[in-house]
Image (cartoon, rainbow, N blue to C red):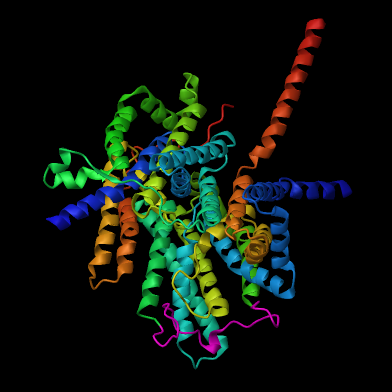
Amino acid sequence: MEQTNKNKVMQFLRGKQYPFIAIGVALLISGCIIKAMGFDPFLALKSLLSGALGTTNAWGETLIKMIPLIFTALSFSVAMKSGIVNLGATGQVYIGSLAGTLIATNFAGLPAIIHIPLALIAGMAAGGAYGWLAIALKNKFGANELVTTIMLNYIAIQFVNYMVSDPIRDYGATTALPQSRMVTDTAVLTKIIPNTRLHIGLFIAIAALILYYILFWHTTKGYELKVTGLSQSVSKYAGMNVKKNQTISMVMAGALAGMCGVIEILAIQSRITQDWAGDIGFDGVAVALLGGNTPVGIGLSAFLFGMLSSGANKMQMMAKVPNAVIYLVQGLVVLFVVGRNIFIWKSKKKNEKKIEKMKQAVHKEQVEV
Amino acid sequence: MDTIVSLFSSVVRMSTPILICALGAVFSERAGVINVGLEGLMLIGALFGVLGSFCTGSAFLGAVTAMAAGLLFALIYAFFTITVKADQTVVGIAFNTIAGGLTVVLYRVLLANSGVSQVKGFNTVAIPGLSQIPVIGPIFFEQSVPIYILYFLIPVLAIVFSKMNIGLKVRAVGDNPVACDTVGISVVKVRYMTVLFSGVMAGMAGAFVSMGQLRFFTEGMISGTGFIAFATVIFGNYTPLGVLRAGLIFGCASALQYKFQTSGSAVPYQVWIMLPYLITILALCLYHKKSNAPKYSGVSFSKD
């Protein structure tokens, strides 16, 4: 009995060391680059950690940064499960945030309990529709989703820029930069911890992670989507509708990204501006890949990347290392996670040598006999 | 007439980085290696071109630096995708993130506070005689040196690709790696070569973007050109001449974008910025005959 439990634990842990090795190697390489540029890598790491976890406020900021990462990572993972590479979370975030802002900046009289869900649903619907667009182009016209989702990102960003520059612009604003009106008080997300900006979006993100777990690990539909992703021919043979399943996945992916956009606007930004989210979707891709598309993995890697992102400014201030270095770390982590064979490769060679030696020994024995 | 000449001359200039990058990528894609990381490789080329030119004071050495950087990063790409056999799309995505971070860091540390706002770039050189031809002359023969090299490269690469032994090997490796291995063609070697070549070309394409007009680096300046080059290979149905046609169409879209943006029309300028991206999507939708796509696209090869 004890033995089987131990086996179960071992089986669960198998392969789990690679993400940690990848993080270590990525930090090592980044440290060397930082050192080569004449900065102190240890000071950089120290100030990054204290900036991310040093105070209650720092913890709050790290958790805040986690929220969009969880959503965009889920957006990538949900699509990935059914075999679609969704690089379009950025665009879906922008379109979702625009729809959410339209609801949140109007209807001032509504009670919060109706206003907030309404804005969230609007964002999910808009993001979902934008995700649907990419998969519809693939299903109807065979357009490669790798390219279309990226192109749709640029288009969405320009569309938001246009909307902010005139149709929904707040002309009464004191700043010259185009921006929308403020989100009305009834649509602002509640804060959780006083003196921090941490908001209930965190709970929504965790709920999304749990729903993701239930859907893909405990329901038939989720299983069907997974089979679609693993083998299209198998799923066709089993009578599943591949196109329909992939469409469902992409709509969910878009909705998750759209939700992310609205939450960021309602809780942090309070108004929509040009290019407000940068290339937010690609951070999510990195989180999903490091987390191996599992709910716990995504949660943990979102925390790690949240730390990087919230500690980066302090690192820039204290160690003078440009904060963009975190993208270098992120990219390297993904590279070594996906290239994990690099760490197995050597031991495999060793095994081969062992087998070779054994063969030779056997051969020798046979000859001697 | 002048406007037409200036528009078409701009089409040639805007097509150039797309074409350089896509002509390199058509070889690696055809050999079965998908490279979503072209955007990142171009970004690397754009930065190192400016850095090289900044350090040496020579545009030529700048271009050489860019190509060397492209080669080095392509080598890492090839190592991870071909030797380590990691998922090609994901490695490509990782490369774009790494390039985005690394170029910004290097730019801020080395260039932003250097007090220099322009480096030596590619000057326009009118070819005596040819540039005197009405209309054609100013459009095609009053350009910078990389564009003339491109005129030369297009037919050469097209012949290498379709008529020569190397081109045949490249195509065979993408379509049937196992058979190639049986007859003694090293799949790994051919794929490495094509990826390295594509890296050099992407580096050069990036250098053309940074050293052509602006003559300096700005953060994220490639803004999708690498992805458009990726789309050009698909839209061009995986042949150099197809790439030429597709690249010119995307170049047209970019040139029109700048033309309309400055013309002060009633249409908001953001719509014109969208134009190249919209046309890319449209092109992929209208053209999905995948007859020339390699059968083993994105599949890594192992002997056992």
Residue A236 among magenta residues: no
- Observer-nearest of B96 and A44: A44
Residue A248 lies left or right of residue A212; in this view the side is left
In the image, taking residue B16 as reference, residue A273 lies left or right, namely right
**Residue drawn at (73%, 23%) of the image:** A353
Quadrant containing the C terminus of chain B is: top right
Q: How many marks?
A: 0
Q: Main secondary structure of the magenta part?
A: loop
Residue appearing at x 40%, y 54% in the figure: B118
User: Is A171 covered by the magenta stretch?
Assistant: yes
Q: Position of residue B79 (x, y in %)?
A: 56, 36
Q: Which residues are magenta?
A: A170-199
For this orientation, the residue located farthest to the top is A368
Relative height, residue B264 to residue A152 (above, below): below
Q: Is residue B263 above or below residue B152?
A: below
- Quadrant of residue A185 in the image? bottom right
